[in-house]
Structure formats: structure tokens, C-alpha cells
Image (cartoon, rainbow, N blue to C red):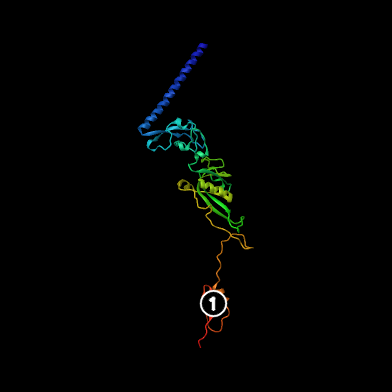
Amino acid sequence: MQQRNWILLGIAVVIGLFAVVLANSYFSGVQQKQERIAEQQKLQRIVVASQDMAFGTPLGIQNLRMANWPADSVPVGAFTSMDDAKRGRVALRPIVVGEPVLASRVSGVDGRATLSANLPVGKLAYTVPVNDVSGVGGFVRPGDRVDVILTRPIPGPGSNSGTDKMTDVILEGVPVLGIDQVADEKDTKAAPAKTATLEVDTLGAQKLALGIQLGALSLALRNVADQASGALTTVVPKHLSVSNYVIHERPSGQSSSFAPPMLPRLPSLAAAMLSRPARPKSPTMTVFRGTQPSEYEVKRGW
């Protein structure tokens, strides 16, 4: 009985080994066939995504595959080896099915999915506080572009900080890197947030830091066509404010509401005429110097 069991076990092992060899031979043949097709059609084998990947997704055999690609249009940074692509790397940006896996969209071999890895050279990430209103009702999401508006009191000794306000657009078309702790560009569902992380340069970060201290910052969402143009840059005017409103000291009792400065009123000609002394009985001649009339009596020559 025991000998029979050993015989059955040996047969099972042989059948299993045969199945493994057969499967390996089949898949090797398929791979070699694809490589021959690629060579004949001047194609190159590169690594593409076999399923959608979000920010921070580890790269592996479960979401990568090799695909033929025209040799003269292989994207810069594409991987030609599966082992090199999946070696401890993670996705730094969303990758869709069939999209080539590029070195610029994945991390290094250390597998760190950090926000700093998404920043272009020379750019900084700076976080500003927002709320339901200043954050466009939660419709600002990672990957959008926004203008940053500063609302602050009008300077000057005559200004009322509670009622006299002014606004300046201090940055235009800046990319949004994250909302709260969400950096996934595929997360497009509107959600109220407390912070927004923006991609700016050094001067832009300084302007945001100063703007937070001077007043209240709010975001204005840009049209998707503006985002796709790629022509938008950070606006860096010479001064933080592009407005030059200043409210000087007001006379006592004057309303605190802001009004543009008035030009000095010139004396009217009618008022000057009415204020003249009574006309003498003899003929006179009126001489105007500017707006001030002067009358001279003309004496008769007889």
C-alpha cells in the first residue's frame, strides 16, 4: 500500500514538472514572438501600465507589462526592462492603463513617494490657509491652477481697518500640488479644505508669507484651457500691491468710508462776479487775472 502511494506521488511530481516546463516554454515562445514582431516592424519593447495607478502605488508585476512601441517615438525616460521599472519604485503621478511608465513619473529605487519628488527644479511648495469660501467651495483640487488674491486694509492714518479694504492679485496661474493631505490628481471630488499647497518660486513663497500676515488670502480657480496652455507664469510685480490707495488724516466728523481724494475747488466765475462791489456810476473796465476780477473806473476825458 505504501509503495503504491509513493508511485502515485512520483507520477504527480512528474506531471507537475511537465506542466511547469510546458507553461514556461509557451510564455517564452510568446515573448520571443513579440520580440521578433517588434524587430520586424521597427518597434521597441517598453514598460506600460496594465492598470490605473494613483500617487504612491508600488510598481510590480501586477500593474506593469511589456508592450510594443514605435521605435522612433519612444518617450524620453521610458523603461525597456521590467526588472528596472519595478525595482522598489512607486508612482509619483497618476498613470492610466496603457500609458508608458516614465522615469519622471515614478520614484527612485528607494520607493519614496514624497511631494518633493514632484517639484520641478527651482520650485517650492508653500501652504496657505483656506476655507469653504476662499477655497472656491472645495472645487479646487490637486492639478488645478489658481490665482491668489490678497484682501487687506487700505494703508494710511485715516483708514478704518474694519471697513476700508482693498484687493490685489499677487500670484497668477500657480499649480495646486495638494489640498489638505491629498496630492492625487485623480481625486476630483469637491471637498472643503483647510489648507492648499501651491507650487511657487522663492519670491512667490515670500509674497504668500507676507500676504498671510497682511490680510486674508483667497483662491480663484482658472479655466481648464488656461491650465493646458502651459503659458502661465507667476506674476511678480515690483511691489506686493499694484494699487496705491492711501487714506490720509480726515477732518473730525468726516465719514470713515473711503472716498477718492477731491481736487481743490476753484472759485467760480459767477461767485466772483456776485462778490464784486457795487458798480460805480461812471464807466468801468473789468480786468480778470486768472479767475479773480478787478474793476477800474474809466474817467471821461471831457
Where is mark 1, residue-wise?
Answer: 294
Q: In the figure, 276 relative to 81: above or below?
A: below
Q: What x and y, as percent, mark residue 3? A: 50, 11
Q: What residue is shown at x 46% (from left), y 19% (from top)?
A: 15
Q: What residue type is labelled 1?
A: Ser
**Residue 63 percent location from the top left of the image:** 48, 33
Q: Where is residue 240 in the image (x, y as percent from the top left)?
A: 53, 52
Residue most extreme to the right: 253
Could you say which is closer to the camera, residue 163 or residue 248?
A: 248
- Residue 10 appearing in the image: yes
Left/right of residue 192 with respect to residue 234 in the rendered view:
right
The answer to whether residue 192 is visible is no
| Residue depicted at x 54% and y 77% | 294
Q: From this viewpoint, which residue is outermost toward the left?
A: 40
Name the residue furthest bottom. Answer: 302
| Residue 280 percent location from the top left of the image | 56, 82
Q: Which of 211 and 87 is in front in this view?
A: 211
Whether residue 39 sits left or right of residue 283 in the image: it is: left
Crowding at label 1, few (<14), some or many (≥20) Cα neighbours within 10 Å? few
Q: In this view, does 250 lie above or below 268?
A: above
- Which of the 4 image quarters holds residue 42? top left
